[in-house]
Amino acid sequence: MKHIGAVLSGLVVVLAAGFSGQAEAAIHQCREGGRMTYQALPCAGQSADLGVKGRRGHGQALDEAQALADELWTGLTAGMPMAAVRGAMPELTQVARSRMRRFESGAIALLEKKVVVAGEDFLAQYLFLNGGFHQVWLSQLPSPQPDAVSKQAFGKVARLLARLWGDAPRENSPVQVTPGEGLFGARFWVDAGGYAQGWVLLKAAPQQEGHSQLTFGYWPKGAQDYEQLRASGREVGQLVVGNE
Protein backbone atom coordinates (compact mmCIF):
# COMPACT_ATOMS: atom_id res chain seq x y z
CA MET A 1 0.00 0.00 0.00
CA LYS A 2 1.55 3.24 -1.09
CA HIS A 3 -0.34 5.34 1.46
CA ILE A 4 1.14 3.69 4.49
CA GLY A 5 4.60 4.77 3.40
CA ALA A 6 3.53 8.40 3.54
CA VAL A 7 1.63 8.03 6.79
CA LEU A 8 4.39 6.19 8.60
CA SER A 9 7.57 7.60 7.09
CA GLY A 10 10.09 8.04 9.89
CA LEU A 11 8.05 6.06 12.41
CA VAL A 12 8.58 2.64 13.96
CA VAL A 13 7.36 -0.43 12.10
CA VAL A 14 7.50 -4.17 12.48
CA LEU A 15 6.17 -7.12 10.51
CA ALA A 16 5.96 -10.80 11.31
CA ALA A 17 5.89 -13.37 8.55
CA GLY A 18 2.93 -15.04 10.21
CA PHE A 19 1.54 -14.85 13.72
CA SER A 20 0.67 -17.68 16.06
CA GLY A 21 -2.41 -17.73 18.23
CA GLN A 22 -0.57 -19.74 20.83
CA ALA A 23 0.27 -18.03 24.11
CA GLU A 24 3.87 -16.93 24.40
CA ALA A 25 5.90 -17.74 27.47
CA ALA A 26 5.49 -15.31 30.34
CA ILE A 27 8.48 -13.07 30.91
CA HIS A 28 9.89 -11.06 33.77
CA GLN A 29 10.06 -7.28 33.77
CA CYS A 30 13.36 -6.19 35.35
CA ARG A 31 15.38 -3.02 35.74
CA GLU A 32 19.07 -3.39 35.00
CA GLY A 33 21.55 -0.54 34.82
CA GLY A 34 18.80 2.05 34.77
CA ARG A 35 16.98 0.39 31.85
CA MET A 36 13.86 -1.75 31.79
CA THR A 37 14.34 -5.22 30.29
CA TYR A 38 12.04 -8.16 29.57
CA GLN A 39 13.47 -11.65 30.02
CA ALA A 40 12.51 -15.30 30.44
CA LEU A 41 14.51 -15.75 33.66
CA PRO A 42 13.73 -14.05 36.99
CA CYS A 43 15.41 -10.73 37.73
CA ALA A 44 18.81 -10.82 39.43
CA GLY A 45 18.44 -11.55 43.15
CA GLN A 46 14.92 -12.91 42.77
CA SER A 47 13.92 -16.54 43.24
CA ALA A 48 12.20 -18.28 40.35
CA ASP A 49 8.94 -18.85 42.24
CA LEU A 50 8.39 -15.23 43.27
CA GLY A 51 7.62 -13.73 39.89
CA VAL A 52 8.25 -10.01 39.47
CA LYS A 53 6.46 -6.81 40.24
CA GLY A 54 6.08 -4.62 37.19
CA ARG A 55 6.06 -0.84 37.30
CA ARG A 56 2.34 -0.94 38.03
CA GLY A 57 2.50 -3.52 40.77
CA HIS A 58 1.91 -6.82 38.97
CA GLY A 59 2.81 -9.54 41.46
CA GLN A 60 3.54 -12.25 38.90
CA ALA A 61 5.51 -12.88 35.75
CA LEU A 62 4.10 -10.69 32.99
CA ASP A 63 3.03 -11.54 29.49
CA GLU A 64 5.53 -9.75 27.28
CA ALA A 65 3.02 -7.83 25.18
CA GLN A 66 1.12 -6.54 28.21
CA ALA A 67 4.40 -5.79 29.98
CA LEU A 68 5.37 -3.66 27.00
CA ALA A 69 2.14 -1.67 27.21
CA ASP A 70 2.40 -1.33 30.99
CA GLU A 71 5.95 -0.08 30.80
CA LEU A 72 5.37 2.42 28.01
CA TRP A 73 1.83 3.76 28.04
CA THR A 74 -0.76 2.03 30.24
CA GLY A 75 -2.52 4.71 32.30
CA LEU A 76 -1.59 7.59 30.00
CA THR A 77 -4.44 9.41 28.26
CA ALA A 78 -4.61 11.84 25.36
CA GLY A 79 -3.98 15.42 26.38
CA MET A 80 -2.31 14.67 29.74
CA PRO A 81 0.05 17.52 30.70
CA MET A 82 3.74 16.70 30.92
CA ALA A 83 3.75 16.93 34.72
CA ALA A 84 1.03 14.28 34.94
CA VAL A 85 2.89 11.97 32.55
CA ARG A 86 6.06 12.32 34.62
CA GLY A 87 4.05 11.66 37.76
CA ALA A 88 2.76 8.41 36.27
CA MET A 89 6.19 7.47 34.92
CA PRO A 90 8.86 9.00 37.17
CA GLU A 91 11.63 7.18 35.32
CA LEU A 92 11.18 9.46 32.29
CA THR A 93 13.78 12.16 31.76
CA GLN A 94 13.39 15.44 29.93
CA VAL A 95 14.82 15.58 26.42
CA ALA A 96 17.77 17.97 26.26
CA ARG A 97 16.84 21.17 24.47
CA SER A 98 19.53 20.57 21.86
CA ARG A 99 17.88 17.23 21.00
CA MET A 100 14.22 18.29 20.99
CA ARG A 101 12.45 17.42 17.75
CA ARG A 102 9.29 18.79 16.22
CA PHE A 103 7.33 16.48 13.94
CA GLU A 104 5.23 17.48 10.94
CA SER A 105 2.12 16.96 13.06
CA GLY A 106 3.36 19.75 15.33
CA ALA A 107 4.08 17.36 18.21
CA ILE A 108 7.36 17.73 20.12
CA ALA A 109 9.39 15.02 21.86
CA LEU A 110 9.79 16.24 25.45
CA LEU A 111 10.33 13.11 27.59
CA GLU A 112 12.25 9.90 26.98
CA LYS A 113 13.80 6.72 28.35
CA LYS A 114 15.73 3.74 27.03
CA VAL A 115 14.04 0.34 27.06
CA VAL A 116 14.68 -3.19 25.82
CA VAL A 117 11.87 -4.65 23.72
CA ALA A 118 12.04 -8.23 22.43
CA GLY A 119 15.76 -8.25 23.20
CA GLU A 120 16.42 -5.07 21.20
CA ASP A 121 17.42 -1.63 22.49
CA PHE A 122 15.03 1.25 21.80
CA LEU A 123 14.72 4.90 22.70
CA ALA A 124 11.14 5.71 23.73
CA GLN A 125 10.15 9.35 23.30
CA TYR A 126 6.91 10.92 24.52
CA LEU A 127 5.42 13.47 22.14
CA PHE A 128 3.22 16.37 23.21
CA LEU A 129 0.88 18.41 21.03
CA ASN A 130 -0.46 21.76 22.25
CA GLY A 131 0.83 20.94 25.72
CA GLY A 132 -0.89 17.53 25.98
CA PHE A 133 0.37 13.96 25.60
CA HIS A 134 -0.09 12.81 22.02
CA GLN A 135 2.10 9.82 21.14
CA VAL A 136 4.85 7.38 22.14
CA TRP A 137 7.52 7.05 19.47
CA LEU A 138 10.25 4.37 19.66
CA SER A 139 13.36 4.01 17.53
CA GLN A 140 15.85 1.15 17.57
CA LEU A 141 19.32 1.82 18.97
CA PRO A 142 21.68 2.26 17.34
CA SER A 143 20.09 3.37 14.09
CA PRO A 144 20.36 2.45 11.30
CA GLN A 145 21.06 -1.28 11.54
CA PRO A 146 22.07 -3.81 8.85
CA ASP A 147 18.99 -4.97 6.96
CA ALA A 148 19.18 -8.53 8.32
CA VAL A 149 19.23 -7.26 11.91
CA SER A 150 16.35 -4.84 11.29
CA LYS A 151 14.20 -7.51 9.62
CA GLN A 152 14.66 -9.90 12.52
CA ALA A 153 13.78 -7.20 15.06
CA PHE A 154 10.81 -6.20 12.92
CA GLY A 155 9.32 -9.68 13.22
CA LYS A 156 9.77 -9.83 16.99
CA VAL A 157 8.21 -6.43 17.62
CA ALA A 158 5.34 -7.13 15.23
CA ARG A 159 4.35 -10.22 17.18
CA LEU A 160 4.06 -8.14 20.35
CA LEU A 161 1.94 -5.45 18.70
CA ALA A 162 -0.32 -8.05 17.09
CA ARG A 163 -1.02 -9.47 20.54
CA LEU A 164 -2.10 -6.02 21.71
CA TRP A 165 -4.14 -4.90 18.72
CA GLY A 166 -4.93 -8.01 16.70
CA ASP A 167 -3.79 -9.79 13.58
CA ALA A 168 -5.77 -7.63 11.16
CA PRO A 169 -4.14 -4.20 10.86
CA ARG A 170 -5.98 -1.61 8.77
CA GLU A 171 -2.93 -1.20 6.54
CA ASN A 172 -0.32 -3.83 5.85
CA SER A 173 2.77 -3.62 3.65
CA PRO A 174 4.79 -6.87 3.69
CA VAL A 175 8.53 -6.52 4.18
CA GLN A 176 10.17 -6.41 0.77
CA VAL A 177 12.59 -4.45 -1.36
CA THR A 178 10.66 -1.85 -3.35
CA PRO A 179 12.00 -0.06 -6.45
CA GLY A 180 13.49 3.29 -5.57
CA GLU A 181 12.85 2.85 -1.84
CA GLY A 182 14.86 -0.19 -0.79
CA LEU A 183 13.75 -2.37 2.10
CA PHE A 184 10.31 -1.42 3.38
CA GLY A 185 7.54 -2.92 5.50
CA ALA A 186 4.77 -1.52 7.68
CA ARG A 187 1.61 -2.16 9.67
CA PHE A 188 -0.94 0.30 10.98
CA TRP A 189 -3.65 -0.52 13.54
CA VAL A 190 -6.96 1.32 13.95
CA ASP A 191 -9.57 0.73 16.67
CA ALA A 192 -13.30 0.12 16.15
CA GLY A 193 -14.02 3.80 16.71
CA GLY A 194 -11.78 4.87 13.85
CA TYR A 195 -8.87 6.11 15.96
CA ALA A 196 -5.27 5.21 15.20
CA GLN A 197 -3.76 2.82 17.76
CA GLY A 198 -0.22 2.30 16.60
CA TRP A 199 2.18 1.38 13.85
CA VAL A 200 5.43 -0.40 13.09
CA LEU A 201 7.75 0.63 10.26
CA LEU A 202 10.87 -0.69 8.58
CA LYS A 203 12.44 1.72 6.14
CA ALA A 204 15.70 1.82 4.20
CA ALA A 205 18.25 4.24 5.62
CA PRO A 206 18.96 7.11 3.23
CA GLN A 207 22.46 7.14 1.78
CA GLN A 208 23.49 3.98 3.66
CA GLU A 209 22.98 0.98 1.42
CA GLY A 210 22.12 -2.29 3.13
CA HIS A 211 20.94 -0.58 6.31
CA SER A 212 17.46 0.28 7.54
CA GLN A 213 15.62 2.03 10.37
CA LEU A 214 13.07 0.37 12.65
CA THR A 215 10.49 2.37 14.57
CA PHE A 216 7.13 1.73 16.20
CA GLY A 217 4.67 3.64 18.31
CA TYR A 218 1.35 4.24 19.97
CA TRP A 219 -1.41 6.84 20.11
CA PRO A 220 -3.61 7.05 23.23
CA LYS A 221 -7.35 6.57 22.68
CA GLY A 222 -8.85 9.48 20.77
CA ALA A 223 -5.56 11.24 20.04
CA GLN A 224 -5.50 10.71 16.27
CA ASP A 225 -8.48 10.18 13.97
CA TYR A 226 -7.42 7.76 11.27
CA GLU A 227 -9.45 9.23 8.39
CA GLN A 228 -8.27 12.74 9.20
CA LEU A 229 -4.72 11.46 9.12
CA ARG A 230 -5.29 9.89 5.71
CA ALA A 231 -6.98 13.01 4.38
CA SER A 232 -4.14 15.24 5.53
CA GLY A 233 -1.62 13.23 3.55
CA ARG A 234 1.06 14.28 6.01
CA GLU A 235 3.92 12.06 7.05
CA VAL A 236 3.15 11.81 10.74
CA GLY A 237 6.65 10.68 11.67
CA GLN A 238 8.45 13.17 9.49
CA LEU A 239 10.73 15.50 11.39
CA VAL A 240 10.67 19.17 10.50
CA VAL A 241 13.05 20.31 13.26
CA GLY A 242 16.04 18.36 14.56
CA ASN A 243 17.82 15.25 13.44
CA GLU A 244 17.49 11.53 14.00
Image (spheres, grey):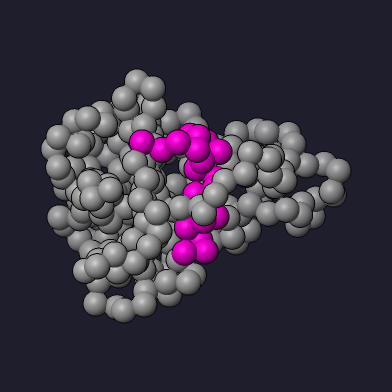
In the picture, the quarter occupied by the C terminus is bottom left
Residue 231 is drawn in which quadrant? Answer: top left
Q: Main secondary structure of the magenta part?
A: helix
Point 14% across, 42% down: residue: 233
Residue at 68% across, 40% down? 22
The quadrant in which residue 134 appears is: top left
Magenta stretch?
151-170
181 vs 191, nearest the viewer: 181
The answer to whether any part of residue 136 appears in the image is no
- In reply to whether residue 155 is colored magenta, the answer given is yes
**Residue under the image location 58 percent in, 41 percent down:** 65
Question: Considering depth in this image, is 115 or 89 the residue closer to the camera?
Answer: 115
Placement of 113 over or under 208, stated as above or below: above
* Residue at 25% from the left image edge and 71% from the top image edge: 206
Give x and y (percent) for residue 159.
54, 47
Residue 18 % position (x, y) = 54, 49
Above or below: residue 213 compared with residue 209: above
| Residue 56 included in the magenta stretch of the image | no
The answer to whether 29 is drawn above or below residue 222 in the figure is: below
Q: Is residue 217 above or below residue 231?
A: below
Please state the horizontal and vertical placement of residue 166, each as a whole percent of the image: 50, 34
Is 19 left, or right, of 134 in this rendering?
Answer: right
